[in-house]
Amino acid sequence: MFRRYLTVAVLIGAVCLLCGCSGFQNSLFECSMSMEHRLSKLQEKSVQAGGLTFSYLERSGPGETIVLLHGFGADKDNWVRFVRHLPKEYRVIAIDLPGHGSTTQDPQATYTIDYLTQGFADAVQALNLDRFHLAGNSMGGFVSVLYSTGNPDHVLSLCLIDPAGAASPQPSDIQLAIDRGENPLVPKSREDFDTLMAYGFHDRPFIPWPINNVLADRYIERSAFNEKMWNDIHFHWKDVVPYLGSLQMRVFLIWGDKDRVLHVSSVSVYQRHIPQVETVILKDCGHVPMLELPKITAGHYTGFLEKCSQEPRASSQGTCPDSDR
């Protein structure tokens, strides 16, 4: 169905181009994203919290709530296709973290992991979220760990997807690039954007050229601010490992075996420090499984949620039974 919608959108864009319409690439991008949101039953909303305006996507559902956090330089749209494959009974919220996506950019703020975590906590309070399942990718995984250790009564379960914060036994390709003085995570040209995509995906999903150009240009427009956030995070860097042993809720770890951003050898660090962790390694997958393999990733996560629902909860701090690692 999506391919049919996308074909129509591309044809509309081609007509606009032939007719000389200005800004047709942006219009096509917005049209495509709007269709993606509709296919996943997501609505874009906003909430005021801690002096910031937080943008988020929400899918209604009668059951428990799932909250999703993206990685550095990304936004809530990273989760759209993943959400499409989650059971319909769950309410789902994907939030733009401070300085990301359509959430407020504050040039006076210092974007440490602690600042991002406090911003997320403010948004949780403003949304009146009591107890929920929390999942985070990359930097969003780091934020999820810090929030969960500080607010264990709110987190029913924790899912970490290629999370940041722990030094990997083997350096990743991006770590080696950073050691050379490069930073592929802050693209400043379309060529840089293509390089970032090559680092992020093992098998990059097809993106029509007008949409790819808009995505690249938006990254480029945000490059100065993203570089500021990157410098803030790394100047005030902290290690996630001391927090891992404090996680008392159920924990699910997903990692792509071809991750070039955060090496899959990091899995051993999380397994060593989180006794109750359940782990899935995805074959032939990169750093963002929810984008590269949304159906498979959502399927594994759904299985984890089903096991969580079958276990009695004396409190929100209960742990999983022995799991496959």
Image: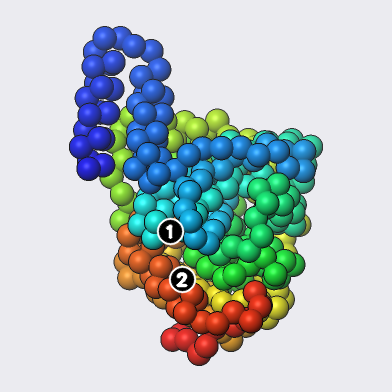
- Taking depth in this image into account, of 17 and 159 the one nearest to the observer is 159
Q: Earlier in the sequence, mark 1 or mark 2?
A: 1
Image quadrant of residue 150?
bottom right
**What's under tag 2, amino acid-wise?**
Leu
Going 68% across and 51% down the picture, which residue do you hit? 128
Q: Position of residue 135 (x, y in %)?
A: 54, 62
Q: Percent x, y for residue 249?
A: 61, 76
In terms of image quadrants, where is residue 158? bottom right
| Residue 91 visible, this angle | yes
Measured from the top left, where is residue 190 in percent x and y? 43, 35
The front one of 3 and 249 is: 249
Residue drawn 55% across the image and 75% down it: 251
> Left or right: 325 with respect to 230?
left
Q: Which residue is mark 1?
A: 89
Side of 180 relative to 189 (left or right): right
The crowding category of the residue bearing disc 1, from other C-alpha atoms within 10 Å (few below 14, some 14 to 19, many at least 20), is: few
Amino acid type for the residue under numbered disc 1 = Glu
Image quarter in which the N terminus is found: top left
Q: Cβ–Cβ below 8 Å for labels 1 and 2?
A: no
At x 70%, y 38%, the residue is 48
Tell me if residue 7 comes above or below residue 253 in the rendering: above
**Label ID, residue 305:** 2
| Position of 251 relative to 220 (above/below) | below
Residue at position x 58%, y 86% in the image: 275
